[in-house]
Image: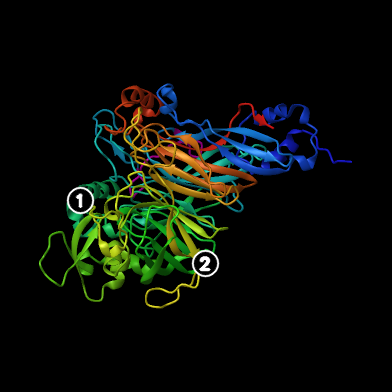
Amino acid sequence: MTDMIDTSRRQALKLLAGVPMLPLAAGTLASFVAGLGDNTALAAPALRVGKTRFVSMAAPTLSNPAAMATTTVESAIEVELADKSRHRFPLSYHPFFITGDMVSDGKGGKILAGGYYDINNQPIIDKSVPGKERHFFSDAPDGTSLLKVPGAKVKGVKGNTVFAVVQFEYTSLDLAGVDAYGTLPSPIAVLTLDQSPETGMLSLVKYHNVDTSKAHGLWITCGASLSPWGTHLSSEEYEPDAPFVSGNKQFKAFSKNVYGDETKANPYHYGHMPEIIVHADGTGSVKKHYNMGRISHELVQVMPDNRTVLMGDDATNSGLFLFVADKAKDLSSGTLYVAKYAPGFTLDTSAAGTKITWIKLGHATSAEIEAMANSLKPSDIMDVKKEDPNDASYTKIFYNGAANWVKMKPGMEKAAAFLETHRYAYLVGGSMAFTKMEGTTVNAKDKVAYSALQNIVDSMVKGGKGFNEESNIALDKALNAGGVVEHKLGGGVSDSKGAKIVSEWVPLSSKMLLVGEDIKADGLGNLSNPNIIGNPDNLKFSEKLRTLFIGEDSGSHVNNFLWAYNVDTKELARLLSIPSGGESTGLHAVDELNCWTYIMSNFQHAGDWNKTLHAKVQPTLDPLVRANYKDRYGAAVGYLTLATTAIKLHG
C-alpha cells in the first residue's frame, strides 16, 4: 500500500523546505494546503521535489507609477514535483528597515539605522542647514552577509539567532543638497535577527554599530561577500590617489569628518579589504587586510580551498587580481598576482575563452604593509607626474583613464606592489584595461567564477580613454550596457617567472557569458534593452538553485533590476525592480541557513535622477519616491520572501 502523508502544517513545511525554499510569509502555508484541494492525500513519492525555476516579472511602467517608485516584486518560484505537477509561489520583498529609522539597540534604547560615527564613535552631525541639524545617515546600504555564529545568544530572540552584517557605502547629499559622496566614514552594522523555525521569516531584534577606529575608519565600502569561515568580507573602493591627495577636496572632507582635521587621514590606510567578525552576543569587530592589494575593491570571493581569493576592481584601467593566502581561513599573509591576458578578448559569448597568465606582484603580511602605510609617503615609493617630463627614466602608464609618467624609487617594489598596486601592476605588464570590474562570485560545481563588467567602454576599446595596446584588451566598439564574464578555474599553474601558484582555483581563461544591448531611448527612456541585463554590478551564485543572481547599477535602465540566470537552462528571469533612480545592492544568496534559503537585497539612492535617462519619468515619480523614502534620504535593507497571496497550481 502506498505510504500516505497528512497535510498538517508540519508536513507542508517539510515539503516546502525541500524545494529549497525561501522564507514563508504569514498565510502562505494555508494557501498552499488550500491550493492542493483534492490532492491533499498525495503519496509521499509524488510530493518529492523535482525541478525549481524562477518565473520572470514584467518591468513596471508609467501605467502604474507607484510600482516604479518602490521595490516591486511580481515574480515567482515554480516547483515541479515528481508527479510532474507544478506549483507556483509568488515572491515578495520584506525590509528590515529604511535607513534613517530609529531601531532597537538591544539595550532598551534606539539607534539610527545607517548612522555615521567619527573615529571616537561620536555621531557625525549634518549642520548644513541652520536650525535643522541632524545625525547623518546613509541612503546607500550595500554589501550584506547573512550568517550564524555557534553558541549565539541574544536577548529578545524567540526562535533561532542569526545575524546580518550590512555596510553603508556613502550618503549622496547633505540636507542643503550638496554632494556628500565619499566624505563620511562608511559605517558597518551587525543586525541580530530572530529566525522563525516554522516559516524562516526574519525579524530585527538588535542593531549594533561596529567600532572601526582600529582600522582608521572605513572608506567607501561597496560590495561584500561571506567567507567560508563565516566572516563578512567588506571592501574599500576608489582608493584615494595618494600622490595627489593634497589637492583632493573629497579626501580632506573625509579626514575632517573622521578626525576633526582635514590633514590627519592617511590615504595609504584606505583601499584595502576589511573583515568583520561577528560575536555570539550580536556585536562585531573589524580587522583590515593591507596585503591584498590597494585597489578599487568592489568585493572579494574566497574559493572553496579557503585560501584563493579572486578580486573585483571597480575602476577604469582596472585589472583582474588574485590573492593566495599562506594558510587556510587566514588572509593576514599571502601572495598577490595580476592577470595578463593573451590577445583575442571578445564580446562574442560563443567564442573560446581568452587565456590568462599570472604575474606575481609580491608576498607580504598585513602587518608589514600596514607598517609601510604608516611610515611611507608616496614620494618614497615612486615619482608620479601627470605631464610628460620628457625623461626616458619615466614610464608612461594609464591610471583611472589618465596618462601618468612613473619612476620607481630603488628597492621600493614591495611597497609599490601593495600600496600603489594599480600603477605597479601596469609597470610589470598586467592587463590593466578593464572598466568597472565589479561583483565576483564562484560556481564551485562547474569550477568557474563570474565577474561583472558594469560598462565595457574607455580603456577596453581601441582609442578610448586609457586604452593601452599592451594590455591585449582591444575591442572595436564600446558596450555601455556591460556584461558578465566567466572565468574557467583550475590548478597546475605557474606564474610568469615559472614559480608554482599553490592553488587549484586559478582563473585559466575568460569569456563573456552574458552581455547587455545598447538601444536608442525607448518610450520610457531606457538606453539599453530592459528585457535583458544592463550594467551588472552585484553577482552571487547559488549552488543549490544553480542560479547566478545579478543586480544592476545602471545608467541605462530607468528602473534597475535583480535578475536570476539559471546556468543549466540558460533562462533569465527578472525577480525584482528597484525604485527608479536607485541601484540594486546588498545581494547575497544563502543556500541554507537552518534549512531555509535566502536572497538578500538592498537598494541605494532612489530618485538619483539622470537628466537623459529619467527625463520622461522624473516629473511623475519624484514626488512618489520622496514620499516613500524620507525625501530621497532613505533606502531599504531586506530580503525576498514568499508572498501571502494564494499559490497557483499548474498541472
**Highlighted range, magenta:** 102-122
Where is residue 267? Give x, y as percent: 27, 57
User: Is 239 placed above or below 322 here?
Assistant: above
For the residue labelled by badge 1, is the local secondary structure a helix, a strand or a loop?
loop
Q: Nearer the viewer, residue 96 or 569?
A: 569
User: Residue 236 has which mark?
Assistant: none
Residue on which the image places disc 2 = 328
For the residue labelled by badge 2, is the local secondary structure a helix, a strand or a loop?
loop
Residue under the point 65% across and 39% down: 79
Q: Residue furthest right?
A: 1
Residue under the point 70% across and 43% down: 49
Quarter in which the N terminus is drawn:
top right
Q: Residue furthest left?
A: 390
Magenta segment's dominant SS is loop
Q: Is 633 one of the magenta-colored residues?
A: no
User: Is 73 placed above or below 487 here?
Assistant: above
Quarter in which the C terminus is drawn:
top right
Residue under the point 23% across and 68% down: 381
Q: Is 103 one of the magenta-colored residues?
A: yes
What colouring does the structure picture have? rainbow
Visible residue check, residue 477: yes
Q: Nearer the viewer, residue 314 or 269?
A: 314
User: Residue 248 has which mark?
Assistant: 1
Relative to 143, 410 lies left or right: left
Quadrant of res 524:
top left
Q: Nearer the viewer, residue 422 or 99?
A: 422
What type is the residue that disc 2 sits on? Ala
Relative to 247, 43 lies left or right: right
